[in-house]
Image (tube, rainbow, N blue to C red):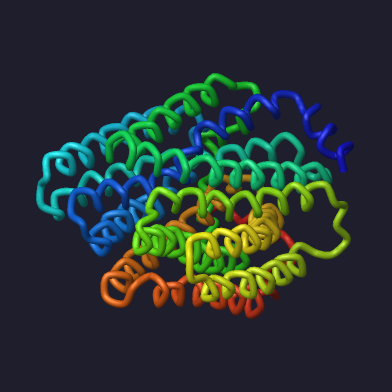
Amino acid sequence: MLGTYRALLGVPGGPAFSAAAFIMRLPISMLGLGTVLLVLSSTGSYGAAGAVSATEALVQAACAPRLGRLIDRLGQRRVMLPALVVHGVGLAALLIPALAGAPTWALFPGAALYGAAYPPAGSLVRARWAHAVAGTPLLATAYSVESILDEVIFVVGPVLVTVLATAVTPSAGLLAAFGFATVGTLALARQRRTEPPRRSLGEPRQPSALRLPGLRVLILLAAALGGLFGSMEIVVVAFATERDARPEAGFVLALIATGSMLSGLLYGGIRWRGSLRRRLLTGMTALCVAISGFTLAHSVGQLAIIAFIAGFAISPTLIPTFGLVEEVVPAAIRTEGLTWLTTGIGVGLALASSGVGRLIDHAGARTAFAIPIGCALLALALAASGARHLTARPADPPAA
């Protein structure tokens, strides 16, 4: 297992762009929760907090594929630097009315702009790995490493944003997230040699990756998983708040990520013989069983133990999901394909966040655990029913 990871560290430029992207995407685990805590401190309503967070996530999901398509055509550097500037303007447009005690409706425009311009860091780094080690067994290991780093992000981010927003000031979490995005984006932009080549401006335009049936299945699956993760995040905050332990919510979320990180580390070091499709179905089945365990919790301590165990089923689901993009989407539109998965997650997160906030306001956190459980079951059904489309990459699509 260690030999596989050592070989990956030897890829020229790989550790450097992976480290930069790690910093760049730390905000992934901070934006939604940070927005919820900011709006909750301003309005006192989980419904309003979930709606504003959902707007941010939904607009990000809608705009991410366009950013990915631009990146495939113009290159990473030429797109992500202007996007970062717009992202910062959106943050200011969200924070100013929130801190001034403005009506809830005034928070939505800033949240929308903030989400629209967030650079798709996960897609950028996975596209760089695919360019560097495509066609070798190291690609699966690289995707595993990035999934492990995603889980590290979800260990660090929720704790950091919760502490900053509750112990310092409600805006501190989002300000820290923008700082990470800025440092990571600038660091990644400097690494020109490992940037995937952009398509020539004279090259015929490629049709959207969305035309591929296998990718559409993965997008729907990602939406169900996004709904699971987004709703679970808010329910955990509400569950802890109902027991006068809101600051502990970040640690519970971090335990979920810790379990996933450990399983991802094991996953990446194994030479798998079964297909990605079979691994996806196995992981989804385990995730459904694990998430159902949340209904057994009656205290934050019990929830923390169950969360840690449930986390072990997450990486074995996410890693083959992203790995299947490389199989079903041609290289020329790979960044767009990866970004569509991010979009699916964002759409699911937005819809579930909005719905779960209202359910919490009316019925409490324990009842609201039904939403993440339902999302897990939906993801399993989608993976099983669409498995026939997740077999092999098609030929490059014809020019439009």
- Residue, x 45% and y 51% (percent of image)? 248
Q: Position of residue 77 (x, y in %)?
A: 49, 27
**In the displayed structure image, the side of residue 181 where residue 1 appears, left or right:** right
Question: Which is more toward the observer, 67 or 248?
Answer: 248
- Residue, x 44% and y 32% (percent of image)? 181
Q: Is residue 135 visible?
A: yes
Q: Position of residue 118 (x, y in %)?
A: 40, 40
Question: Which is more toward the observer, 362 or 201?
Answer: 362
Q: Position of residue 186 (x, y in %)?
A: 47, 23
Residue 113's place in the image compared with 45, above or below, is above
- Residue, x 49% and y 66% (percent of image)? 228
Q: How many numbered dots are placed on residues in this image?
A: 0
- Residue, x 88% and y 61% (percent of image)? 273
| Residue 360 occupies quadrant | bottom left
Q: Identify the image quadrant of the N terminus.
A: top right
Question: Which is more toward the observer, 315 or 245?
Answer: 245
Q: Is residue 347 visible?
A: no
Q: Position of residue 19 (x, y in %)?
A: 61, 29
| Residue 379 occupies quadrant | bottom right
